[in-house]
Image: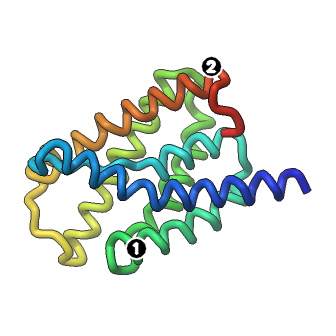
Amino acid sequence: MKEFKNASLKAVLLFLVFFLDGQVSQLITDLNGGGVFFTSHLLLLLLFFYSMNTQGLFLGPLSVVLGFFYDNYYLNGFGIAIFLVPLSLLVIIKLKNSFPDNFFSDLLLISFILFGYDLASYGLASLYGQTGFPIEVFLLTNAIPSLLLNSFIFCIFYFLRRKGVIKGF
């Protein structure tokens, strides 16, 4: 019963972060004048931390549902996030077991996941005809700044988690 209660609470928190994610991205982009587009991946970061302590049996179906909502809420379409969010979670779970459990390997892993997620999103959006940006423009104005932002956010949450300030994930 306690595990179900914790899983339910984690699901609610993931949905709250899902809605907060776009707001944070828009706020940071507006604050810098709009020349560089930041995309916060708080949802993927939280899934990364949850995958350390939670069975994939709970997170797998939840990541599909979150991907579905992400597609419809942010992209007004269907197919990119419903595929990439569960795939990212699967890669996190599989690669996490191959890396030692320390800060630098976790930072490298999450950087790889986030950059791969952005590139795969761009590739699928180009394939579907949803974007006309050249890859160089996308990398310089979105992918690299977003990677730096999310790496910084990851460092903050990682150290807060290690210090015991944030418990439960």
Q: Could you tell me residue 162's position as x and y percent?
A: 62, 22
Q: CA distance from mark 1 to mark 2?
A: 35 Å
| Sequence-wise first label, 1 or 2 | 1
Q: Could you tell me residue 61's position as x and y percent?
A: 64, 67
Residue found at the far right of this picture: 1
162 sits left or right of 68 in the view: right
Disc number for residue 73 = 1
Q: Secondary structure at mark 2?
A: loop
- The type of residue carrying mark 2 is Lys
Q: Could you tell me residue 62's position as x and y percent?
A: 62, 65
* Position above or below: 138 against 48: below
Disc number for residue 163 = 2
Residue at the (62%, 36%) spot, across then down:
97
Kindly indicate the quadrant of the structure image that contains residue 22: bottom left
* 2 or 60, nearer to the observer: 2
**Circle 2 Cα neighbour tier, 10 Å, few/some/many (<14 / 14–19 / ≥20):** few
